[in-house]
Amino acid sequence: GNSVTQMEGPVTLSEEAFLTINCTYTATGYPSLFWYVQYPGEGLQLLLKATKADDKGSNKGFEATYRKETTSFHLEKGSVQVSDSAVYFCALSDRSGTASKLTFGTGTRLQVTL
Amino acid sequence: DSGVTQTPKHLITATGQRVTLRCSPRSGDLSVYWYQQSLDQGLQFLIQYYNGEERAKGNILERFSAQQFPDLHSELNLSSLELGDSALYFCASSVGLWNEQFFGPGTRLTVL
């Protein structure tokens, strides 16, 4: 079946540091890949997505590239801010069968300090 | 604000009881999904409805059921509640079967 593996957290960075959160996946077919962010006490927000190999998703300074050869979708940001502190979830959606569900990783908590 | 609304925001109940969680999708969205977020299981897909019909089932217990009504809102019914059912329950919606999903703020269920 499908699965998503994320690096363990928490990740603690100083403001303006470079961020990488690793994500690898296992899937049949050609999944779409997503990063969602969950701020404290809130629901999930779609951060970025990529629907095919070599696509790069980007939003709010965050980027991730769909790498089919390494089955990866690592999240990066060049300079993090305190406001980026949240839990980040990597997910995939496999368009097989008659429906589309999201399979999530375990989440990585990011804490950014001044 | 995603446009997906969920009520109630918090729910506290006792073991053995039954509760109903409600979700209103974004205007124009035909698909509704339910997910459970717990500390030990993480985020898990429960069930999907599209235009009133069940389309996919995940790790949903037999004690749980859901439906989507003609006005496209959805309800998730949880019965014979156990302590382990305490979790955040999210609803998400999408325009069609394959489009990106937008999540509501969740309902936090506490079973005492």
Image (spheres, coloured by chain):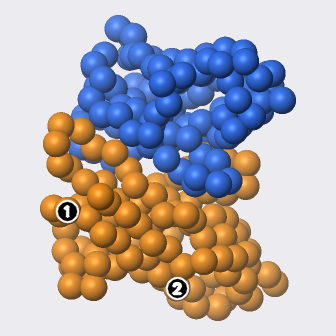
Chain colours: A orange, B blue
Task: State left or right for residue A84 relative to residue B34.
Answer: right
Q: Is residue B38 visible?
A: yes
Between the residue at mark 2 and the residue at mark 1, the CA separation in whole angstroms equals 26 Å
Along the viewing direction, whichever of A67 and A70 lies nearer the viewer = A70
Between tags 2 and 1, which lies in front? 1
At horizontal 30% and vertical 23% (from top left) the residue drawn is: B54
Q: Residues within 10 Å of mark 2 (few under 14, many from 20)?
A: some
Find the residue positioned furthest to the top.
Answer: B70
At horizontal 70% and vertical 29% (from top left) the residue drawn is: B82
User: Eyeballing the image, is B75 above or below A114?
Assistant: above
User: What amino acid is found at the position of numbered circle 2 in the picture?
Assistant: Thr
Q: Which mark is residue A62?
A: none
At horizontal 43% and vertical 76% (from top left) the residue drawn is: A23
Along the viewing direction, whichever of B2 and B76 lies nearer the viewer = B76
Q: Secondary structure at mark 1?
A: loop
Q: Secondary structure at mark 2?
A: strand
Q: How many marks?
A: 2
Quadrant where the N terminus of chain A is found in the figure? bottom left
The disc, 2 or 1, on the residue closer to the chain's N-terminal end is 2
Q: In which quadrant of the rendered view does residue A4 lie? A: bottom left
Instruction: Identify residue for label 2.
Output: A20
| Position of residue B98 measured from the top left corner of the image (x, y, whole percent) | 24, 43
| Position of residue B34 measured from the top left corner of the image (x, y, whole percent) | 47, 34
User: What amino acid is found at the position of numbered circle 1 in the picture?
Assistant: Thr
Instruction: Identify residue for label 1.
Output: A28
| Position of residue B7 measured from the top left corner of the image (x, y, whole percent) | 64, 23
| Position of residue A40 measured from the top left corner of the image (x, y, whole percent) | 73, 55
